[in-house]
Amino acid sequence: MTASRPPSFTLTVEAETTDPVVRVDGDLDHETCDELMSTVEQNLTVRHTAERRLLDPRLVFAGLRGIDSMGLSVPLMIRRRTDAARVRLHLDERPPQLERLLEITGTLDHLTAPCDVRDGEQHPGTG
């Protein structure tokens, strides 16, 4: 019996841009979702520490081949972190399969809406 090998998955972080950009290539699934989450969290922490100001993170999905429910949970967790930091999450270059998944799960509007902050309270998914 041969051991299964996970499909290739790469993340590319563009640190020289105004906003932190993470390019996702491959399958975002239960085997790769932790890598994306930790990369984004690390980038937000480093930027916050170095600049004392968080910038809007951009996730670029042009190279995304597939996504499962665990993969979908990562943008939702990232959205919670960006709402808490009062920055806007951008999901750029979404391929049709991601667009469809976001639409049928009802998460597209939530993930792409600006965070509305009033009176110190956060109201994610509005705007």
Image (cartoon, helix red, strand yellow):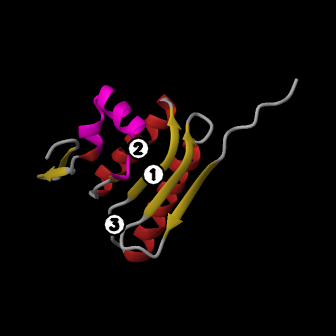
| Disc on the earlier residue, 1 or 3 | 3
The answer to whether marks 1 and 3 mark residues whose Cβ atoms lie closer than 8 Å is no
Residue at the spot x=38%, y=52% of the render? Answer: 93
Q: Residue furthest front?
A: 96
Label 2 sits on residue: 95
Residue at the spot x=47%, y=29% of the render? Answer: 69
Element under disc 2 = loop
Label 3 sits on residue: 55
| Disc on the earlier residue, 1 or 2 | 1
State the image coordinates of residue 21 (x, y, percent, origin top left). Answer: 43, 63
How crowded pointer 1 is (Cα within 10 Å; few <14, some 14-19, many 20+) is rated as some
Label 1 sits on residue: 62
The answer to if 20 sits in the magenta stretch is no
The answer to whether marks 1 and 2 mark residues whose Cβ atoms lie closer than 8 Å is yes
Q: Where on the picture, by quarter, is residue 102?
A: top left
Is the residue 88 above or below the residue 97 in the image?
below
For the residues carrying marks 2 and 3, which lies nearer the camera in this image? 2
Residue at the spot x=37%, y=60% of the render? Answer: 57
Q: Where on the picture, by quarter, is residue 3?
A: top right
Q: CA distance from mark 2 to mark 3?
A: 24 Å
Element under disc 1 = strand
Q: CA distance from mark 1 to mark 3?
A: 21 Å
State the image coordinates of residue 85 (x, y, percent, origin top left). Answer: 32, 57
